[in-house]
Amino acid sequence: MEQVYWNPTMETMPREQLRALQNERLRDVVRRVYEHVPFYRNKMQQLGITPNDIHGVEDLHLLPFTEKQDLRNNYPFGLFAVPQSEIVRIHASSGTTGKPSVAGYTSGDVDRWAELMARAMYCANVGKSDIVQVAYGYGLFTGGLGAHQGAGKLGATVIPMSSGNTQRQIMMMREMGATMLCCTPSYATHLGETIREMGLEPGKDIHLKAGCFGAEPWTEEMRKQIEELLGINAYDVYGLTEIAGPGVGFECVAKHGMHVSEDHVIPEIIDPVTEQPLPYRTPGELVFTTITKEGMPMLRYRTHDICTLDDTPCECGRTLVRMGRITGRTDDMIVVRGVNVFPTQIESVLVGLEGVAPHYLLVVDRVHSADTLEVQVEMTEDMVSDTVSHIQGLARTIHERIKSVVGISTDVKLVAPKSIPRSEGKAKRVIDKRKL
Ligand code: DLL
């Protein structure tokens, strides 16, 4: 039988056996941070617990949470569990305010992360004979190097493009015959549109067959759009600097949620307000405990990403739980006239609709003490030359559909093609003028 798993032992381990492994690794990491990270020792002492109280996953709820702010307070190396001389790599995620959060990786951490990303890419059918174009940014952001290491582990040929320089990306993709693309979904859309504008045809001029896209929320509608534009299979991949980078969650052929490599991390879903763990298939905030990281282990790290976890068996045969698509972040949510709105809800309405391009921007403001939400969406070239009444009709349709999804009236503004800035990395979907 054709091997469909990069690491069959770990990816299909019976759950009881996996639980035993997690218990052992959890006890080990709790002991390590207690001994080597004053922040965790203090937190545990405040809670009146010692490593002896943690026998396994059933005791996870006793452990303290870790917040992004804790990383900032201990900036830059305060949460490292090993001497700095053992750290071989630093990554950081750019915060909009204050200090970035810094993560340090030992050589073993880098290897394990490459393993996670190799699992993800292998799922997308990438192997030794593939040519992987990495168009995530290289640098402190984990996307570029994360995808690079994963492809390297599979023995694939890597084109380390980094993000941006779209014409050059397409030239390389075409001339090198890239078969796999790694970048943000918003940049994949931009690349796909530019390929079409250049008169190039996927399948004939461009030989991509798959893509691993992540680093920002995206919808099923956006997936279809990208698959059509590039003629590929598009897979979702999830990760975050504090835990490992891309590869923490990865989609299989079923494309029904991302498997979490539970031999390296323990995921939980909690109610973001009460902080109580929630059962499988209930949406809430995703929390991770790393159980194999050496450099900067994290206990119950609050991601602020919203999704569900599902332990029902997957048709691919992996026993690892699946996390659903990220529908938003608790801090991405915009509250307009008391109603919670996530950009992905609006995206699901807009993308794929006849007459509009998959580029949009939400502008929130407060006028005469009332919140307003303007939804700017680009028209296609065809639509621009259509009649005024058709354009108005399209705006009305969008308005009604958004209203039925989010429950509030918005100002829909159809804007000229290419007027919304394109992103090469994570797209900016919201401008909240109330916060300026
Ligand atoms: O974005 C790591 C990454 C790179 C993941 C490339 C996937 C591909 P950070 O910059 O630390 O790390 O940002 C992490 O990005 O908490 C989510 O809010 C968001 N995010 C990451 N992947 C996804 C995804 C990288 N597949 C933050 N869907 C996370 C939705 C995602 N949001």
Image (cartoon, rainbow, N blue to C red):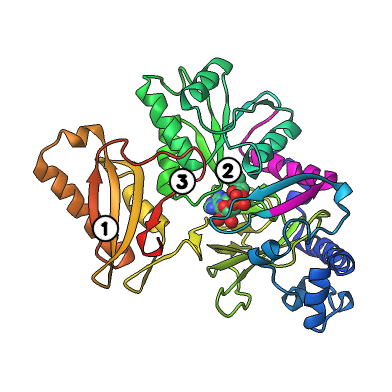
Q: Answer with left or right where residue 203 lies relative to residue 267.
A: left
Q: Is residue 280 left or right of residue 342?
A: right
Q: In the rendering, which numbered label is found on residue 427?
A: 3
Q: Nearer the viewer, mark 2 or mark 3?
A: 3
Residue 344, by quadrant, is bottom left
Q: Which residue is mark 2?
A: 253
Figure quadrant of the C terminus? bottom left
First to last magenta residue range = 102-127
Label 2, label 3: how far apart the Cα atoms are = 26 Å
Q: Residue at left 37%, top 25%? A: 196
Position of residue 128 measured from the top left corner of the image (x, y, whole percent): 71, 26
What residue is shown with label 1?
A: 401
Badge 2 density bin: few <14, some 14–19, many ≥20, Cα 10 Å: some
> Which residue corresponds to the image point at 52% horizontal and 25% vertical from the top-left?
169
How far apart marks 2 and 1 lie (CA) works out to 31 Å
Q: Secondary structure at mark 3?
A: loop
